[in-house]
Amino acid sequence: MVRILLRAIWIGCLGMLLAMLAGFAIVMAALLFDPKCGPGDSGGCAMGLVTVTLGAAIPGYVIGFVGYLAVALWRLRPPLPTIRQLRNWGRED
């Protein structure tokens, strides 16, 4: 169980990193096509870049952590009964 928790923390950190990189790339692409951002700008466009990048960190971590934890716990569940076991439920063999 400790191994699952440590791996979930690791996957959460990877999710955080990927979410931050994706947010950075999306905003950077949007800034390239914005005519108001560029030389002579007061710096508001650059602050949007930082805000989105840091704002994506926590949701990325939570999605990675909870997603991996859900999958790992789903794999640990006991196997479901077969059709034959359900059909013979309560009967003596």
Image (cartoon, rainbow, N blue to C red):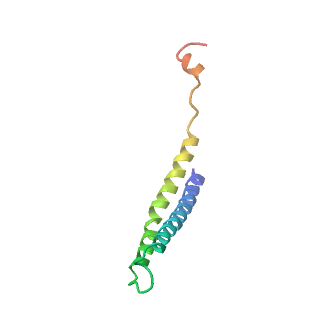
List x then y, in percent, for residue 53: 47, 70
Q: Nearer the viewer, residue 74 or 20?
A: 20
Name which residue lies at 43% across and 69% down: 52
List x then y, in percent, for residue 5: 55, 54
Can you name the residue that lies furthest to the bottom here?
40
Quarter location, residue 39: bottom left
Name which residue lies at 54% across and 66% down: 17
Query: Is 82 placed above or below 53 here?
Result: above
List x then y, in percent, for residue 30: 46, 69
Q: How many marks?
A: 0
Quarter location, residue 86: top right
Can you name the residue that lies furthest to the top here?
92
Q: Nearer the viewer, residue 14 or 76?
A: 14
Q: In the picture provided, is 43 more to the left or to the right than 23?
A: left
Picture quarter with the C terminus: top right
Q: Nearer the viewer, residue 1 or 51?
A: 51
Query: Is 44 placed above or below 88 here?
Result: below
Query: Is 39 placed above or below 24 here?
Result: below
List x then y, in percent, for residue 56: 45, 65
Query: Is 73 placed above or below 62 here?
Result: above
Q: In the picture provided, is 29 more to the left or to the right than 45?
A: right
Name which residue lies at 40% across and 84% down: 41
